Amino acid sequence: MTQTIALLVDAYRELNAKKLFWITLVLSGFIVAAFACVGLDAQGLKILWWSFPIPMFNTGTISLDLFYKFVFVNFGAALWLAWAAMILAVVSTASIIPDFVSGGAVELSLSKPIGRLRLFLTKYVTGLLFVMLQVGVFSLASFMVIGLRGGAWEPRLFLAIPIVVGVFSYLYCISALVGLLTRSTVAALLLTLLFWIFLFILNSADAATLAIKTDMAGRLTAQEKRLVRQQAEVERREHWAADLLNEKARAEANEKGEPEPAPAAWTPEQLDAADPTLPNVRGERGRLEKQIEESTDNIKQLKRWNDGFVIAKTIFPKTTETTGLLERVLVSDSDLEKLAKAFGGEERRGRRDPDRPDSDLEMERAMRDRSVGWIVGTSLGFEALVLLATCWIFCRRDF
């Protein structure tokens, strides 16, 4: 244990000597400062002393603590921690394993009475330590801002530490494997970034097909509601036309002195003759039925594509979904609806169809329906396999 602690202390000193460690820390401070300068009032958005009136986005529509949690999740965590700071972390830690296994450094470490597996895992944890410290400082500062400015002391904010460190570990295991095989910092960095880009493309394909499928499902819902109303209109007009024909038949029987006939079952042609607008109403119903059939077929096809991307994602780490877990914890479903209403959603983009659900909100709900076990479990399983292979290579290789 003493040896492991000594290695971690040495690793901390190594991180402390890196300029990017302090650059990232300073940038995190600027982000938190900007975070603290933004607020809400009764009129709208407030930045320091200046207020920008926004009718649908003020303390009357959403609470101040919800606003700060939304900003933290979508800008602080999703943009800064999960992208910008993550890139700096990948760049900073890419050299840890290559530098360790080259230039005689590994021979010196192996000469000490410590197992190879523990030695490698300690070096691996060193890279995670970089992100853990950065996210810890950022989360603590954001916790204070939300507490002091938003009036909500939210300890669940610190879940950003394991979540962001977990996302980084998905990438760092690839960096460690490539660095061990090639002993090249450049190769470890480039291949890790390429792997990250691949994950981004796969996730974008999944998100795009899911968004289109959700949008088309909303259209289908609206079409089905319109079809119900159109069917009711057809039945109303047919009933009116039948009553008109029955009344006419009774009038003709009375003129001839004959008994009144019983209500007859009139043919569509007879009803059309009685009400000339019926063909158009039936045509509209037929058009809606055709649209519903086409929409159903398109949704089935998109579902097959989306299921394929989900199956492909099952094999690989899910960086975006893992980061999104923080929003699940901090922003409830009811808060999500409040935010959708505050930002206007599809209504502000000109979609005012009351029959059609908000596709953005439905898309978010669909993403939240994906289980935490699938998101985290399969991602950690991938990392475990890569890390196991890396440890096996390190323990078996002659240095």
Image (cartoon, helix red, strand yellow):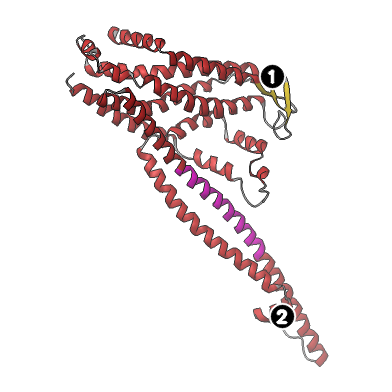
Residue 352: x and y in percent read 68, 49
Of 161 and 244, nearer the camera is: 161
Q: How many marks?
A: 2
* Outermost residue toward the left in this view: 398
Badge number at residue 48:
1
Residue 200 at x, y percent in the picture: 43, 37
Q: Is residue 222 magenta?
A: yes
Q: Is residue 106 left or right of residue 237?
A: left
Horizontally, is 219 left or right of 189 in the view? right
User: Is 66 colored magenta in this rendering?
Assistant: no
Disc 1 secondary structure class:
loop
The secondary structure type at the circle numbered 2 is: helix
Task: Pinpoint residue 117: horizontal percent, then vertical percent.
Answer: 24, 19
State the residue at coordinates (61%, 25%): 68
Q: Outermost residue toward the front? A: 186
Viewer-proximal residue among 159 and 398? 398
Q: Is residue 299 placed above or below 58 in the rendered structure?
A: below
Residue 133 visible here: yes
Of the two numbered discs 2 and 1 on the same chain, state the one appearing first in sequence: 1
Q: Quadrant of residue 322?
A: top left
Quadrant housing the C terminus:
top left
Q: How many neighbours does mark 1 have within 10 angstroms: few (below 14), some (14-19), or many (20 or more)?
A: few
The amino acid pointed to by label 2 is: Ala
Disc number at residue 273? 2
Mark 2 to mark 1: distance in Å? 72 Å
- Look at label 1 and name its amino acid: Leu
Q: Quadrant of the N terminus?
A: top left
Residue range in magenta is 205-230
Residue 368 versus residue 392 in the image, above or below: below
Residue at position x 56%, y 49% in the image? 215
